């Protein structure tokens, strides 16, 4: 994690270089760019000099189609660089310049004090071998893919961002802003980072992990052959019922012992853990969309009491149900 002791500011401004390319995610670039651009030293002057660069320079089309003006990635733009950040791309639309960009980046990896990636930019650093043996993260959708393609990386699928020495990696898209705020706090201290967060109307430290924003639960619950999909649908429609192994086995038309063994083999988790996940997912949806008291949500989601739901919710999402509703619940009528 970042240092909790503010480091003395260097003379002048630290230089941040953000590496873009065709089809790069626009928010990956602009989120970090805005945070660093808003940061101020104690005297009120800009704390950072921020440059957006690309392999050849000039106009680069982002994933949204919006064109960004960039400088050329070369000796000049990387002179005295403090932090080098590689942004991400839409996994369904791989960037068209990654191979040649990697070759150019390889020449400069030792230059910056900090080297990092935003979102799927982790794949570019991974291809360069930078993340081998280190803990890292990326967008939750492709964490498994990163782990499979680069088994030497210790992938943390729930972290908003991860620091491993001088290497920083962040989760999907807006998490790049969280990481930028943490870097600002590391450089300039808590108050400077808090000022930026307030100006951007953001949490300085976002509670919880990626799981509170993802919708991966249905995918996690689905075994490769879809053997228990009907059972999962039945559970979702009967959350207040007795969902013991005996009951689930009867629904699945299997003996309890065989059901528990096969379920664990096919899904990678026990039936009890699966039920807890599905109940927690249902509670999350109710907290986002309904005005029911917490106790009623706990009953409707099958937890029985709010304390049992609170424990499961904190384990799954890193925040209490009350805190989650305060941040993501529907406004009162």
Image: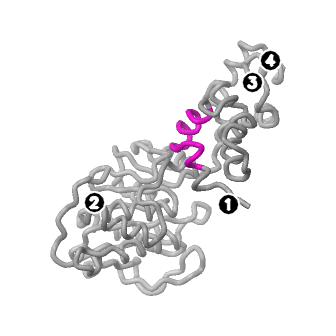
Q: Residue at x 61, y 50 (%)?
A: 325
What stretch of residues is rendered in magenta?
309-324
Tell me residue 270's x, y (percent). Answer: 63, 24
Q: Secondary structure at mark 4?
A: loop
Tell me residue 43's x, y (percent). Answer: 22, 78
Q: CA distance from mark 3 to mark 1?
A: 33 Å
User: Which residue is denoted by mark 4 in the rendering?
Assistant: 254
Picture mark count: 4
Q: Is residue 56 above or below residue 103?
A: below
Tell me residue 321's x, y (percent). Answer: 59, 43
Tag 1: Cα neighbours inside 10 Å, few (<14), some, or many (≥20)?
few
Q: Secondary structure at mark 3?
A: loop
Q: Earlier in the sequence, mark 2 or mark 4?
A: 2
Q: In this orientation, which residue lies closer to the viewer: 302 or 125?
A: 302
Q: Earlier in the sequence, mark 3 or mark 1?
A: 3
Tell me residue 67's x, y (percent). Answer: 53, 84
Q: Please identify the dominant SS of the magenta region.
A: helix
* The image quarter in which residue 328 lies: bottom right
Q: Earlier in the sequence, mark 1 or mark 4?
A: 4
Mark 2–mark 1 contact, CB under 8 Å?
no
Tag 2: Cα neighbours inside 10 Å, few (<14), some, or many (≥20)?
many
Q: CA distance from mark 2 to mark 1?
A: 35 Å
Q: Is residue 315 magenta?
A: yes
Left or right of residue 15, residue 149 in this image: right
Q: Secondary structure at mark 2?
A: helix
Q: In this orientation, which residue lies closer to the viewer: 311 or 110?
A: 311
């Amino acid at each position: 994690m970042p240092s909790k002791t503010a480091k003395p500011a260097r003379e002048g401004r630290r230089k941040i270089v953000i590496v873009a390319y065709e089809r790069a995610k626009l928010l990956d670039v602009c989120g970090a760019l805005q945070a660093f651009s808003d940061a101020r030293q104690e005297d009120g002057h800009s704390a950072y000099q921020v440059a957006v660069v690309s392999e050849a320079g000039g106009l680069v089309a982002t994933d949204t189609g919006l064109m960004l003006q960039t400088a050329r990635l070369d000796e000049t733009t990387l002179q005295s660089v403090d932090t080098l950040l590689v942004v991400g791309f839409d996994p369904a639309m791989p960037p068209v310049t990654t191979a040649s960009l990697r070759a150019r980046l390889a020449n400069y990896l030792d230059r910056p004090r900090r080297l990092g990636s935003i979102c799927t930019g982790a794949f570019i650093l991974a291809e360069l071998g930078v993340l081998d043996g280190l803990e890292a993260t990326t967008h939750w959708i492709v964490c498994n893919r990163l782990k499979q393609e680069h088994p030497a990386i210790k992938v943390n699928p729930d972290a908003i961002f991860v620091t491993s020495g001088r290497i920083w990696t962040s989760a999907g898209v807006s998490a790049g802003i969280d990481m930028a705020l943490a870097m600002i706090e590391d450089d300039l201290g808590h108050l400077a980072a808090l000022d930026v967060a307030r100006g951007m109307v953001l949490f300085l430290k976002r509670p919880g992990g990626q799981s509170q924003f993802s919708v991966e639960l249905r995918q996690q619950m689905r075994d490769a052959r879809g053997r228990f999909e009907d059972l999962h649908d039945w559970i979702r429609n009967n959350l207040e019922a007795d969902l013991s192994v005996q009951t689930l086995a009867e629904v699945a038309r299997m003996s309890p012992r065989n059901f528990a063994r096969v379920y664990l083999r096919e899904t990678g988790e026990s039936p009890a853990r699966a039920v807890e996940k599905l109940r927690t997912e249902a509670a999350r949806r109710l907290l986002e969309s309904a005005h029911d008291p917490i106790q009623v949500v706990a009953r409707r989601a099958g937890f029985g009491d709010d304390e049992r739901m609170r424990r499961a919710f904190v384990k799954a999402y890193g925040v209490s149900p009350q805190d989650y509703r305060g941040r993501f619940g529907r406004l009162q009528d």
